[in-house]
Amino acid sequence: MVTKKDIKFINSLKHKKFRHLNSSFIVEGKKSIAEFLDSDYELIKLFSVDCSIFNKIKNQIKIDKSLLRKISFLINPDDHLAIFKLSDAKPIDNNNLIIALESIRDPGNLGTIIRTCEWFGIKDIICSMNSVDCYSPKVIQSAMGSVSRVNITYLDLDTYLKSTKTIKIGASLNGKSIYQHNKSLDNGIIVFGNEANGISSGLFKLMDFNLSIPRFQNNNFPESLNLASSVGIILGEIKRKSI
Amino acid sequence: MVTKKDIKFINSLKHKKFRHLNSSFIVEGKKSIAEFLDSDYELIKLFSVDCSIFNKIKNQIKIDKSLLRKISFLINPDDHLAIFKLSDAKPIDNNNLIIALESIRDPGNLGTIIRTCEWFGIKDIICSMNSVDCYSPKVIQSAMGSVSRVNITYLDLDTYLKSTKTIKIGASLNGKSIYQHNKSLDNGIIVFGNEANGISSGLFKLMDFNLSIPRFQNNNFPESLNLASSVGIILGEIKRKSI
């Protein structure tokens, strides 16, 4: 049975505060839920319109479509909604290439970046404390299951970058062309700044060097690329050199 | 003065049907409006909280913030909202590299793709008729002004691809690695399929060859990349070869 309290609880998980207070977050859709079930995340409860899909799952409650619409965060809910337990990030592995994000605001961007990072074999993403929460429903949705496998750590980026000896590369509009940087990068931290403002001046000073994606246009438009696209293009180029 | 009829008219422009019936679309925000004013698009009317910003524009009406909130499509409106006249796409230039999109659904993806295409010097984007409308407010917003400069043509993609002799390259999950394709592409059409299903089997048959972005992961996850990210990564790699 689904009580009013359950519905209220699920709705509260839209908000970061309640997700962290209750160590719980929502995953929707058959595919994403299957990927989280296969991961280290622990299922708290699964609500299904059709219980035959995840028939081995015990903490499962059958609900009808109208109730699903009530509890879902999606416009077109996908038959299943699961509550998983938040877990702490694992230690960061400095032997691999790491992506660091400063003050990232857009949940769709973060989700896409997590998905892209997994595609390119990145195991660790570091986010500044004021970045959007990776357990936000929109991040989970646009990351398409990748949040279950990529290690995402929130920390004081300034302190972390000052304390680590790993090479630090800024992604900026005024760096060296990614096409001219001929070394492969098997480790190091590539830092991407906020969508509107780029890397802050404080962090910028900590970079060993900066890389840019050249613009193939001579009218100075557009001013910049979308952040998630930039991460993809830079990783595509860096990983090419590792083959 | 702003009448109730004006407000109703602006609200109707959320919908593709009314945009095309009235040959009008909305651009919001100082930067994007400035870029459209600098383009071939014709301004119909500009609503400004602060008329000093575009002080040379005659078709300008001063409004207050509360009215702006009423007519704006944004959660945080940006002081200016303009109505521009829709214009027909220009002829497609087959001497340049062209990006074709089949059944693209997500307005944020289309906007990001238009912005990325402009960055990489693409002049023409072709969309299948059932693709999301490039004058949708969300596309205009995520394209950051690039809709004013990139030529976007909606047409029957199947008929067009059958009729053109230009080389046709499919972006798919099972093509040749973009890193192994060593020729530069100064012209040709790169076709990207729908977000969920990729290129349809009908169009797939028309491709001369297919290109893929290699996955640097051996667990088959994630299943795919975000569409806009894929466009960026493929263009980043193709343009590298043209330097």
Image: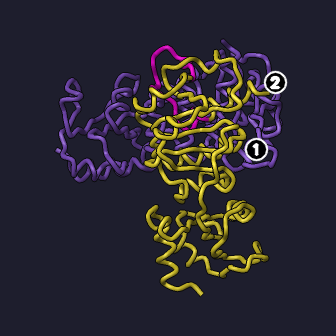
Chain colours: A yellow, B purple
Residue B131 horizontal/vertical position (percent): 60, 43
Residue A54 placement (x, y as % from top left):
75, 73
Task: Point out the tag, 1 or 2, that comes first from the N-terminus.
Answer: 2
Residue drawn at point x = 54 percent, y = 32 percent = B114
Q: Amino acid at mark 2?
A: Gln
The quadrant where residue A119 appears: top right
Q: Is residue A60 left or right of residue A109?
A: right
> What residue is shown with label 1?
B200
Disc sitting over residue A20 in the figure: none
Can you say which quadrant of the picture contains the N terminus of chain A?
Answer: bottom right
User: What's under tag 1, amino acid-wise?
Assistant: Ser
Q: Quadrant of the C terminus of chain A?
A: top right
The residue indicated by pointer 2 is B180
B111 vs A35, nearest the viewer: A35
Q: Which SS class for mark 2?
A: loop
Asked if the magenta segment contains residue A202, the reply would be no
Query: What is the chain identity of the residue bearing mark 2?
Result: B
Q: Is residue B66 above or below residue B229?
A: below
Magenta region, residue range: A213-231
Between the C-alphas of marks 1 and 2, the distance is 25 Å
Residue B121, image x and y in percent?
A: 57, 20
Going by the image, does B167 lie left or right of A61?
A: right
